[in-house]
Image (tube, rainbow, N blue to C red):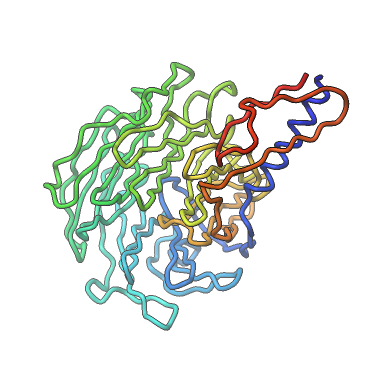
Amino acid sequence: MSRLFLLLLVYLFSSITASAQFSSLQQIEPLPITSNTQDKTQSKLFAHDGKHWAVLPNATGTHLWRLDGDSWTHILRLSTKTGSRADCKVVGNLVHIFMYQGTNSQLVSLEYIPGSSTYKLWTAQNSLVSISINSGVETAMIEVDDTGRMWLAYDGSSTVNVRWSDAPYTQWSSPITLASGIASNDKCAIIAMPGKIGVFWSNQNTKRWGFKTHTDGDSPTNWSADEVPASQSALNVGYGMADDHMNLKVASDGTLYCAIKTGYNDESYPLIGLLVRRANGTWDSLYDVSRLGTTPIVVLNEDAGKLRIVYSSRTYGGDILYNESPISNISIGPQMTLKEGARFRDPTSSKQNFNPDGLILITNVDAGVAVGVLASDDGSSPDPTDKFHLTINTIGDGTVAKTPSQETYDAGSAVSLTAT
């Protein structure tokens, strides 16, 4: 009986793996950098006019790069600072780039030149904007809501804060505190949702996640109550449910997907997880992605009906792994390898969703370069009304019973197999 059961598992696992991979992966030439592709909340990449772009620093400053084929073309030097950690937001033919540089950070806005595959400084604001941030902040990121207002979110030594600015984004408000009592190494992330802005954060003191929303056009100080995401899943294990690793994406229907790392630090419990906020404001229970890994990001391809959670296998670098799920019915698939290497870390992608492809960059710690893949799907996904037959092949004596036992099954159906 045990031999038959093992053969069944191998057969089913192979079937799942074959259907869950990207349709193509194009390797990208290395780009020398002077600051890792961190932070996990940020997006160093963006797509526009059929091209992929990156903002990364080297020994001469912080630069805009364009991906041509599998190699990088230099476009503009944005700053002389060599330690910038960028976050990029596309709005029409503009891209706003926040360069986190500690207490003296910078914002630059670029305007696309149609037909030229290049950018220039924004006509309405053609110089760098200096933004002072308090000491004790680990990182920061930007978003732009549907009214055109820009928001900056960052963690303080014990608070979660936002600031805002209207175009052309030269004058910034005082900090608005959304939460207090967080640990000094907690972080937050901000995301534009249909008709609102959302801020998600970790609180390692309470061992919970936090989330608040702001409706576009309301007073900047008017925010919702803390939703305490997926608190029904929190366990009193290790350091608790919340670590300071998070990355957010939103679907066109307003569903929010959050790749997170827990503090459970026990192989019997989830370490990498997925939290999902439905458009009606309810949170699913935590989805278990992996019992190992760190610095996860989530990428969506709505046309293909898929999401992936991408992460490094070890804290200071390892393989880059990913798991896949259909968007329509969350079901985390097996762990797969995106890029194999002893010292890969800090995956980053764009705020935009894949369509039909997307770029994922990582840091090769030993070589001091950014490497990565252009990952693509064919854009097809099963019709949810399709019916499927389940065929079981066995080796040796015995029988296999299906529960439920029927001729056809709907997409996403769960079927138990019992070998006797």
**Could you say which quadrant of the image residue 4 lies in?**
top right
Residue at the extreme bottom of the image, as rendered = 115
Instruction: Name the side, left or right, on which 153 lies relative to 59.
Output: left
Q: Residue at point 34% right, 58% down? A: 98
The image shows residue 41 at horizontal and vertical percentages of 41, 46
The image shows residue 258 at horizontal and vertical percentages of 42, 40
The image shows residue 209 at horizontal and vertical percentages of 35, 30
Residue at the extreme right of the image, as rendered = 396
Q: Nearer the viewer, residue 276 or 29?
A: 276
**Could you say which quadrant of the image residue 108 lies in?**
bottom left
Q: Residue at point 20% right, 62% down? A: 170
The image shows residue 283 at horizontal and vertical percentages of 36, 33
Instruction: Name the side, left or right, on which 179 lies relative to 322.
Output: left
**Could you say which quadrant of the image residue 199 lies in?**
top left
Q: How many marks?
A: 0
Instruction: Name the side, left or right, on which 387 lies relative to 191.
Output: right
Q: Residue at point 23% right, 45% down? A: 162
Residue at the extreme front of the image, as rendered = 407
Q: Is residue 243 above or below residue 339?
A: above
User: The C terminus lies in which quarter of the figure?
Assistant: top right
Q: Residue at point 51% right, 62% down? A: 356
